[in-house]
Image: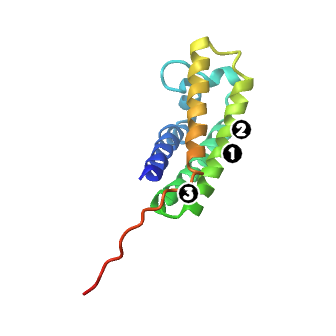
Amino acid sequence: MTTRRTLLGTLIAACLLHVWAYFAPQTWYETFPGIGRGWLLRLGPYSEHLVTDMAALYMAMLVVTIAAWRFADDDRYVRTVGGAWLAFNCFHLLYHLRHLSMYSPGERVAIVGLLSALTVISAVLLIPSPRVHRKPLELS
């Protein structure tokens, strides 16, 4: 059950922000994270191609995460998806750690906290699920 909850949290995070980015890339770029902060404007010029490609990649990860949720009893699949998310989230976090100077102290805490949490959640998916031993059904 914990595996499914972790996957569900990953699904929600991937879906909410990146469907928005794909279908409204300019608005997403100008207003992300959606609380009047405009974090992305500080990182460089807008590129519709880059934003929509990034959003499409997130949606591809959404598809494999849905499959992992569906087959959450198969640790191999869940761990593979977790490894992919972990690789992405580690590199994403490292990028932002190198580019914090343009943000206020509160924004730095929010960015590092959120991206660190996503990295930890990804790592949790690498932990094998506890096996529940059930008594076999007796057919009489």
Number of the label disc, if any, that sits on residue 91: 2
Q: Residue at x 48, y 63 (%)?
A: 73
Separation of residues labelled 2 and 3 (CA atoms): 20 Å
CA gap between label 1 and label 3 equals 14 Å
Whether residues under marks 1 and 3 lie with C-beta atoms below 8 angstroms apart, the answer is no
Q: Which residue is mark 1?
A: 87
Q: Is residue 130 above or below residue 115?
A: below
* As drawn, 11 above or below 104: below
Quarter assignment of residue 32? top right
Question: Which residue appears farthest toward the right when viewing the image?
Answer: 98
Q: Secondary structure at mark 1?
A: helix
- Residue 52: x %, y % from top left: 62, 42
Where is mark 3, residue-wise?
A: 78
Q: Is 133 left, or right, of 48 in this rendering? A: left
Q: Secondary structure at mark 2?
A: helix
Q: Amino acid at mark 2?
A: Phe
Number of other residues with Cα within 10 Å of mark 2, as a class: few under 14, some 14 to 19, many 20 or more: few
Depth order, front residue of 136/15: 136
Q: Earlier in the sequence, mark 2 or mark 3?
A: 3
Q: Please state which of the two labelled residues, at mark 2 or mark 3, is closer to the viewer.
A: 3
| Residue 59 shows in this picture | yes
Q: Which residue is nearer to you in this view: 37 or 105?
A: 105
Amino acid at the residue labelled 1: Ala
Name the amino acid, label 3: Val
